[in-house]
Amino acid sequence: MSGAAGTAQIVHASSVAFGRRGVLILGASGRGKSTLALQLMGMGCALVSDDRTALAARDGVVVAASPKRIRGRIEARGVGILKADPLPVARIVLLVDLDETEERRLPPERMRDLLGVALPVVHRVESPHFPAAILQYLKAGRAE
């Protein structure tokens, strides 16, 4: 996969999408990337990639796909490697950083550069509503 400017990379992250709008889930090993991805899949999202995600910048948009060797597989800790029907490609519209914990009730909008594209980023929220909030973000975005 190559971008318009030739920018591409594989990152240690999981990704799922609702429609073609995807979220890239970042964090150190054991932080819960696959767990959050599975929760979102249980709510109707499609797997793009688990553990490693291939990213490319195309015309000011970051797109995600799965490296061929792991396509259609997701780790469920304590259960095993599960099969999933993967979405071939998704546009990344949100980054979730599980290494940072959100303390504010209404956090400011944060942006992070990824392959030269500014994308919104949210931090881990220690609450059962977090996966549902991420799904709603994928569906409709954030209000101003």
Image: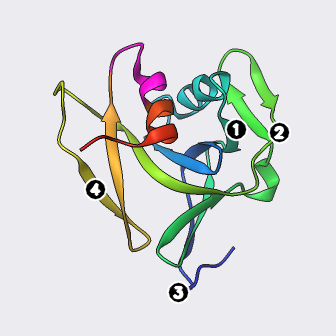
Q: State the residue position of label 1.
A: 46
Residue drawn at (41%, 23%), measured in percent from left and top?
Answer: 130
Q: Is residue 105 left or right of residue 99?
A: left
**Helix, strand or loop at mark 4:** strand
Please tell me how crowded label 3 is: few (under 14), some (14-19), or many (20+) other residues with Cα within 10 Å: few
Find disc 4 in the rendering and name its residue. Answer: 111
Residue depicted at x 59% and y 79%: 3
CA gap between label 4 and label 3 equals 21 Å
The crowd level at tag 2 (other Cα within 10 Å; few <14, some 14-19, many 20+) is: few
Spatial CA distance of label 2 from label 1 is 7 Å
Q: Is residue 129 magenta?
A: yes
Question: Helix or strand or loop: what does disc 1 sit on?
Answer: strand
- Magenta residues, as a range? 126-133
Answer yes or no: do the residues labelled 2 and 3 have beta carbons within 8 Å?
no
Q: Amino acid at mark 4?
A: Met
Mark before the other along the chain sequence, 4 or 2: 2
Q: Are marks 2 and 1 in contact (CB under 8 Å)?
A: yes
Q: Residue at x 46, y 75 (%)?
A: 60
Q: Which residue is mark 2?
A: 85
Of the numbered discs 4 and 1, the one sitting upstream in the chain is 1
The Cα atoms of the two marked residues, 4 and 2, are separated by 31 Å
